[in-house]
Image: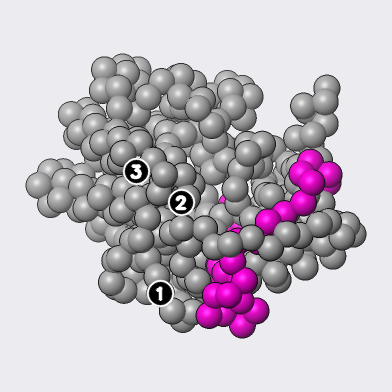
Amino acid sequence: MTVLVTGGAGYIGSHMVFELLDRGEQPVVLDNLSTGFRWAAPDGVPFYEGDVGDGALIDRIAAAHDVDAIIHFAARIVVPESVADPLGYYANNTVKARALIESAMRNRIRHFIFSSTAAVYGDVSGEPVTEDAPLRPVSPYGRSKLMTEWMLEDAGRAHDLTYVILRYFNVAGADPAGRAGQSSLDATHLIKVAAQAALGRRAGLDVYGTDYPTPDGTCLRDYIHVTDLVRAHMDALARLRAGGASLIANCGYQRGYSVREVIDVVKRVSGVDFPVRLAPRRPGDPPAIVAANARIRAELGWTPQHDDLEEIVRQALAWERRLHNRQAA
């Protein structure tokens, strides 16, 4: 059987493809290359350039590759951008996801793994947030993802479809073997931006908000290594194929770091004291959000292997150097 990875030429999707290959699976990639890179998909893996909302294309892929599961990463993910362009986010993240779910059911693809987000919780306290917490997203990005969660739940009740919804916290780092990493030059993720600043790719780094109700006034986040994240997807796939019930679970380490703490680690690991500028808060950013992860451990047997901020930073820096060498070649 084959696993269709949407957004498989992007940051997390490319890691997922390598993980599937490492486990002896047969992935096929669908990506429109709006933010992904064709070279990020490994040679020999079937690749389709196209849109997840294109039902006819999904039909062709499903027929050609005997697809039994979809792992859906393709989405727009920048919170401030979603505030400025809400309808674009609903069109891309929600309307097209609805079309993809419909395509899955039409082609009798019974398993669906969806990359959701901690943004569905909205403003929460600094305590680890459980999956049963109220869902109060404060950005169109979070709302667009929550709508897709609801669609999957409703479709699962009405049809022969089982799903796992994984609510990501802050994904960071790169493949320990150096095969993949975060490659977008204009990425907004803190560790990526800090690595670029440390290596001279940016003139410095902006800290958005220093008056939050956190220990040092900057936002607090739970950073999860991308390799631990994609392994959670493999655990989810195994659950569904074994006949397990649908599930919603957080993906995080149950440990938060502030923006200032992350910057300090990047400076220490890189040995570079890059400029840091203080800026006003960005719209849609909650002060602190940390994952409770008891459910994913209990239900999927997931055990983190890279729960170390310095390791995450070292690998992000190493990938940034490889990326620069590739671009300079």
- Dot 2, how many residues are within 10 Å of its Cα: few (below 14), some (14-19), or many (20+)? many
Q: Label 3 sits on what residue type?
A: Pro
Residue most extreme to the front? 280
Residue highlighted by disc 1 = 124
Is residue 251 visible from the viewing direction of this image?
no
Q: What range of the chain is rendered magenta?
A: 199-228
Q: Nearer the viewer, residue 43 or 144?
A: 144
- Which residue does the image show at 79% across and 46% down from the upper left? 203
Image coordinates for residue 161, horizontal then vertical, percent: 20, 44
First along the sequence among labels 1 and 2? 2
C-beta proximity under 8 Å, tags 1 and 2: no
The label on residue 86 is 3
What is the secondary structure assignment of the residue under circle 3? helix
The label on residue 79 is 2
How many marks can you see? 3
Please tell me in which quadrant of the rendered image residue 201 appears.
top right
Image coordinates for residue 77, horizontal then vertical, percent: 46, 45
SS majority, magenta: loop
Please tell me in which quadrant of the rendered image residue 129 appears.
bottom left
Q: Label 1 sits on what residue type?
A: Val
Q: Nearer the viewer, residue 99 or 63?
A: 99
